[in-house]
Image (tube, grey):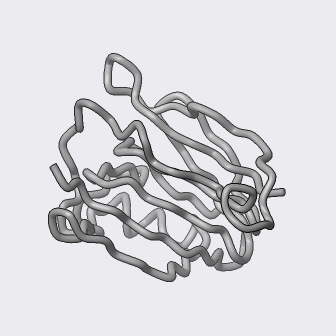
Amino acid sequence: MVRRIVTGNDAQGRSFIVSDEIVATGGIEPDGLVWRESDAPERWLPSSAPHLEPPWGGSRCSRVVLPPWKEMAPLVEAGGIPGLDAEGFHRTETIDHILMLEGEVDLVLDDARTTIRPGDVVIQRNTSHAWQNMTDRPAIFWGVMVARSS
């Protein structure tokens, strides 16, 4: 069983949680399937951080070690990370698959906030979001970004 959080944009372009549920996994597909993208956004919203994106039609896989927010906040607030606003919000023209490995991090959206823990999976779908680690230890997750292909 895996907790899967899926994000989306409402008609006004504000990000929200489309679903937050426990899904069965562990077998050979379809039993082990966590997500299959079949309804990508019809209207993609512009990116605020294109330098993070893979090339058109490509993908990017990263292991992210996110420091505590109390360490990150001054850098983010000062504009020290391109594409992020003062709270760390950014948007990419990608579908992102996030697997939390260690620690915990808050996924912050325009209209929601939820804590992601080890084993949780987030499907981030072209939404404005921020990652804030409110603990005293680094949080570690894998992220796979899939760029638009058409």
Question: Is 13 positioned to the left or the right of 3 in the image?
Answer: left
Q: Identify whether 117 is placed above or below 38.
A: below
Q: Identify whether 72 is placed above or below 41.
A: below
| Image x and y of residue 87, in percent | 43, 50
Front residue of 18/67: it is: 18
Quadrant of res 78: bottom left
Q: Residue at x 57, y 76 (%)?
A: 67
Question: Is 50 positioned to the left or the right of 29 in the image?
Answer: left
Quadrant of res 29: bottom right
Farthest-out residue, top: 11
Quadrant of res 65: bottom right
Q: Identify whether 49 is placed above or below 66.
A: above
Is the N terminus in the top left, top right, bottom left or bottom right quadrant? Answer: bottom right
| Image x and y of residue 148, in percent | 23, 54
Q: Residue at x 64, y 58 (%)?
A: 121
Q: Residue at x 58, y 33 (%)?
A: 112
Q: Residue at x 40, y 30 (%)?
A: 9
| Image x and y of residue 28, in percent | 72, 67
| Image x and y of residue 98, in percent | 55, 63
Question: Is 139 positioned to the left or the right of 64 in the image?
Answer: right
